[in-house]
């Protein structure tokens, strides 16, 4: 199983631990925004959305800040893989949120 994480904070690390309990052979990729971020053992770091298109993921988990979810969704939609998105989905509500959802 190959899983992409967008964001690698404390919540992502909890998801990684849970996935590894299910499948010890899982390959974890992390899309990181900071090339100077701490390296975590057994995680393959990626620093550009463009680099994702050469890889084949079973699914992705969006665990980056809520304010980044919409942008991440737009950039990942062409991968055509299942997405698990940490709540809240967006940081706005009402009509503006409906308009955003309709553009995806």
Image (tube, rainbow, N blue to C red):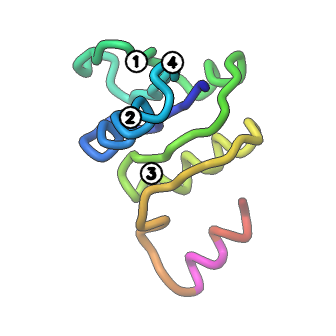
Q: Quadrant of the C terminus?
A: bottom right
Q: CA distance from mark 4 to mark 1?
A: 12 Å
Check contact, mark 3 vs mark 2: CB within 8 A.
Answer: no
Check contact, mark 2 vs mark 1: CB within 8 A.
Answer: yes
Q: Which residue is mark 4?
A: 25
The percent coordinates of residue 103 (x first, y second) are 73, 64
- Residue 16 is labelled as 2
Q: CA distance from mark 4 to mark 3?
A: 29 Å
- Residue 43 is labelled as 1
Instruction: Tell me if 95 is positioned left or right of 78 in this view.
Output: left
Q: Which numbered disc, 2 or 1, marks the residue closer to the eye?
A: 2
- Residue 68 is labelled as 3
Magenta region, residue range: 95-99
Q: Which numbered disc, 2 or 4, marks the residue closer to the eye?
A: 4
Position of residue 7 relative to residue 93, above or below, is above
Q: Which of the marked residues, 4 or 1, is nearer the chain's N terminus?
A: 4
Q: Considering the numbered disc 2 on the image, is that residue within a helix, a strand or a loop?
A: helix
Q: Quadrant of residue 78?
A: top right
Q: CA distance from mark 3 to mark 2?
A: 20 Å
Q: Which numbered disc, 4 or 1, marks the residue closer to the eye?
A: 4
Q: Considering the numbered disc 1 on the image, is that residue within a helix, a strand or a loop?
A: strand
The percent coordinates of residue 1 (x first, y second) are 61, 26
The percent coordinates of residue 70 (x first, y second) are 55, 56
Q: Residues within 10 Å of mark 1 (few under 14, many from 20)?
A: some
């Amino acid at each position: 199983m190959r899983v992409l994480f967008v964001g690698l904070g404390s919540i992502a690390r909890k998801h990684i631990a849970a996935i590894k309990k299910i499948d010890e052979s899982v390959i974890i990729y992390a899309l990181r925004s900071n090339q100077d971020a701490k390296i975590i053992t057994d995680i393959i770091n990626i620093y550009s959305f463009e680099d994702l298109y050469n890889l084949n993921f079973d699914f992705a988990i969006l665990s980056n800040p809520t304010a980044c979810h919409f942008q991440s969704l737009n950039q990942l939609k062409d991968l055509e893989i299942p997405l698990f998105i940490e709540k809240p989905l967006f940081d706005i509500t009402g009509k503006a949120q409906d308009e955003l959802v309709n553009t995806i």
